[in-house]
Amino acid sequence: MRTLVLNAGYEPLAVVSFKRAVVLVLNSKATVILSDIDHPVHSASGTYERPSVIVLTRYVKIPRARLVPVSRRGILRRDGQRCCYCGHTATTIDHVLPKSRGGDESWENLVACCLGCNNKKSDRTPGEMGWSMRFNPRIPHHTAWMARGLESAEPQWGEYLAPLAA
Ligand SMILES: [Zn+2]
């Protein structure tokens, strides 16, 4: 059983084990806003609500780079699985400035790319290909959607994750 942790502003932040969540609540670091009443937690010191969703009492500011690690899945998701160059379904990741020429593995230098464009482009830049980019790759603004564990969300978290679908 896992617990969804919301930041003090109610943005989804992380998914933790319910034990970790209980400790946060007992230490007044978080408040339970949704509990699993059918499965209370029994321990030597008493019985507790099993937290399903908790909200932190104090706002935690997390460095953007740490919250949003660059990943293949993250890039595809940010770009809506569409090729940055032609708009077709993308299954690969392209380095805008090729790696061989110093391009880095950053949100700003990686884009979703279809296999065809990726093969054609090889280690050239979009400019050299005469291609335009459909968008400027950026670090995602809505950082919370990348929180670890949210990909396999529990059904009861739905309303707390709803803003993410927007
Ligand atoms: Zn393409």
Image (tube, rainbow, N blue to C red):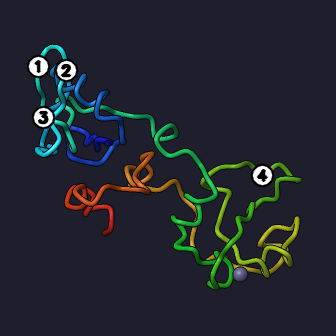
Q: Residue at x 64, y 58 (%)?
A: 72
Query: Mark 1 belongs to which amino acid?
Result: Gly
Instruction: Determine the CA span between mark 4 and mark 3.
Output: 50 Å
Pointer 3: what residue?
Answer: 49
Circle on res. 46: 1
Assess whether mark 2 and mark 1 are in contact (beta carbons under 8 angstroms). yes
The quadrant the N terminus occupies is: top left
Q: Which corner quadrant of the figure contains ligand 1?
A: bottom right
Helix, strand or loop status at disc 1: strand
Q: Where residue 120 sits: x, y (%)?
A: 86, 78
Assess whether mark 3 and mark 2 are in contact (beta carbons under 8 angstroms). no
Query: Mark 4 belongs to which amino acid?
Result: Gly
Pointer 2: what residue?
Answer: 43
Query: Mark 3 belongs to which amino acid?
Result: Glu
Query: Going by the image, does 45 lie left or right of 75?
Result: left
For marks 4 and 3, the one nearer the N-term is: 3
Circle on res. 123: none
Instruction: Determine the CA span between mark 4 and mark 1.
Output: 56 Å
Instruction: Determine the CA span between mark 1 and mark 2.
Output: 5 Å
